[in-house]
Amino acid sequence: MIKMLALKKACLPGINMKDESIIDQYSEMSSYCRQCIEEIDQMKLTKVVWSCSFFDLLKKRQCQIAALMSNPKFERNFRLFDLTRFPTYAEDVVRAFMRAQQCYESMLDQEELINEAFYNILPWMLGRRMVKFLCQCCENAK
């Protein structure tokens, strides 16, 4: 719960939360929260590719991260990175990456279905844009 509070605080830095005052009363909790915030700061500075940090994997929607999957460096850099540098959030980062990967595979399947539905007469870029539009509609519905 504390690590999620630290994430929320990193996403909304100007807001003071009532839970913070409770955590500050206990030295172990306060220390752990500071450790989480330091780890988040490191994740913000550490890039998977130039346009995406490890913090972005936790913060952005899976469709936004899935769009980066077409860049071969993205997956390679992620897999080669030593996630033990972020011990508190390593599992969360891996889960976010896997969800984005599943979303990307789903987007590719949708592109293929759109191409089949139009008997492969549409340019591939149009099919890709239709899928991106569907993702935006899905996210707006949430």
Image (cartoon, helix red, strand yellow):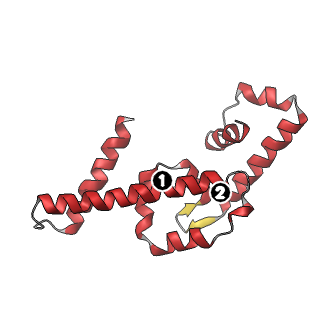
**Secondary element type, mark 1:** helix
Determine if residue 65 is in view: no
- Looking at the picture, does residue 6 appear above or below residue 129? above
Q: Nearer the viewer, residue 19 or 94?
A: 94
Q: Quadrant of residue 33?
A: top right
Secondary element at tag 2: helix
Q: CA distance from mark 1 to mark 2?
A: 20 Å
Rendered image quadrant of residue 69: bottom left
The residue sitting at 76% across, 30% down in the picture is 20
Q: Which image quarter holds the N terminus?
A: top right
Picture disc at residue 59: none
Callout in the foreground (1, 2): 1
Q: Where does label 2 land, which residue?
A: 44
Q: Look at mark 1 in the image and give the residue it sits on.
A: 99
Q: State which quarter of the image contains the C terminus.
A: top left
Q: Position of residue 55 (x, y in %)?
A: 61, 54
Residue type at mark 2: give it.
Lys
- The answer to whether residue 86 is left or right of residue 56 is right
Query: Do we see residue 39 in this rendering?
Result: yes
Give the residue at x 68% y 37%: 5
Q: Is residue 137 left or right of residue 46?
A: left
Task: Name the residue at the right extreme.
Answer: 27
Q: Upstream in the sequence, badge 1 or badge 2?
A: 2
The kind of residue tagged 1 is Arg
Frontmost residue, 99 versus 8: 99
Residue at image coords 62%, 39%: 12
Left or right: residue 128 compared with residue 105:
left
Classify mark 1: residues with Cα within 10 Å, few (<14), some (14-19) or many (20+): some
